Image (cartoon, rainbow, N blue to C red):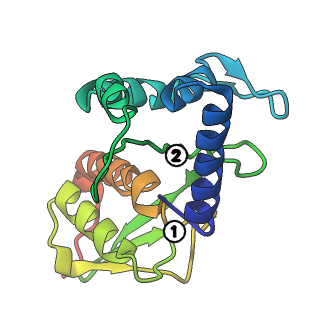
């Protein structure tokens, strides 16, 4: 679960969903499955098509693995004693609403310095979650350069929307990897014409 206020709001909506299912006499899983956004749904506000997100399939697979129907039927029987058993579920799916295109965007730039060090420019903000370390490690592994020579430069920041700390290491990692692949290709193609400085 990610970002500010999400755990609290998800707890409230999931409790409310269970209460609604109970009042309607519907299985909580069935109620959630019926209200999943279908593939091909077009957002009436921004016109973006919702192609897939896997939440419905995740619920169906989870229900199968934990034997949801069987356990619901068993635990619905009257129980007594100090220990009583039940089974429940909760779901959460994050779909970005970042203005104006409802897409998470980012960019990166890398420079190989004359002293052999490399600078990686990314707009990802380091707030203790380890973004600087992880991105430098990924760039080093993808380029074949040593991790120790990488410098993350926060002073000239490329495009990055928005901070989203819980999503940072999920949505951004491929940017340094793709960048380094292009950088290596460019280096191979142009190395014979690059001047040598001794």
Q: Position of residue 194 (x, y in %)?
A: 29, 61
Q: Is residue 88 above or below residue 110?
A: above
Question: From what the image shows, is residue 155 above or below residue 72?
Answer: below
Left or right: 76, with 138 as reference point:
right
- Quarter of the C terminus within the rendering: bottom left
80 vs 159, left or right, is left
Q: Position of residue 133 (x, y in %)?
A: 30, 75
Residue 155 position (above or below residue 65): below
CB atoms of marks 2 and 1 within 8 Å: no
Give the residue drawn at x 59%, y 54%: 10
Q: Residue furthest front?
A: 80
For the residue pair 148 and 99, the one nearer the viewer reads as 99
Q: Name which residue lies at 38% across and 30% down.
A: 58
Residue 24 appears in the rendering: yes
Q: Say which label, 2 or 1, has the lower sequence index.
A: 2
Say if 165 sits above or below 148 in the image: above
At x 38%, y 23%, the residue is 60
* CA distance separating discs 2 and 1: 17 Å
| Rendered location of residue 192, percent (x, y) | 22, 53
- Mark 1: few/some/many CA within 10 Å (<14, 14-19, 20+): some
Mark 2: give few (<14), some (14-19) or many (20+) Cα within 10 Å.
Answer: some
| Secondary element at image label 1 | loop
Q: Secondary structure at mark 2?
A: loop
Q: Which residue is mark 1?
A: 165
Q: Which mark is residue 92?
A: 2
* Quadrant of the image occupied by residue 128: bottom left
Number of on-image labels: 2
Residue sitting at the far top: 40
């Amino acid at each position: 679960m990610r970002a500010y206020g999400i755990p609290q709001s998800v707890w409230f909506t999931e409790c409310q969903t269970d209460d609604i299912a109970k009042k309607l006499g519907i299985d909580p899983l069935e109620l959630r499955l019926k209200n999943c956004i279908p593939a091909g749904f077009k957002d009436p506000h921004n016109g973006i098509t919702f192609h897939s997100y896997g939440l419905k399939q995740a619920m169906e697979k989870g229900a199968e693995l934990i034997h949801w129907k069987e356990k619901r039927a068993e635990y619905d029987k009257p129980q007594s004693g100090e220990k009583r058993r039940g089974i429940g579920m909760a779901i959460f799916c994050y779909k970005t609403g970042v203005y104006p295109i409802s897409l998470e965007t980012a960019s990166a730039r890398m420079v190989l310095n004359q002293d052999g060090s490399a600078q990686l420019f990314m707009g990802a903000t380091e707030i203790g979650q380890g973004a600087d370390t992880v991105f430098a490690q990924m760039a080093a592994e993808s380029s074949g350069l040593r991790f120790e020579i990488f410098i993350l430069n926060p002073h000239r920041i490329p495009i990055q929307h928005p901070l989203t700390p819980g999503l940072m290491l999920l949505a951004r990692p491929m940017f340094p990897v793709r960048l380094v692949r292009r950088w290596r290709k460019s280096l191979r193609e142009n190395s014979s014409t690059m001047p040598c400085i001794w």
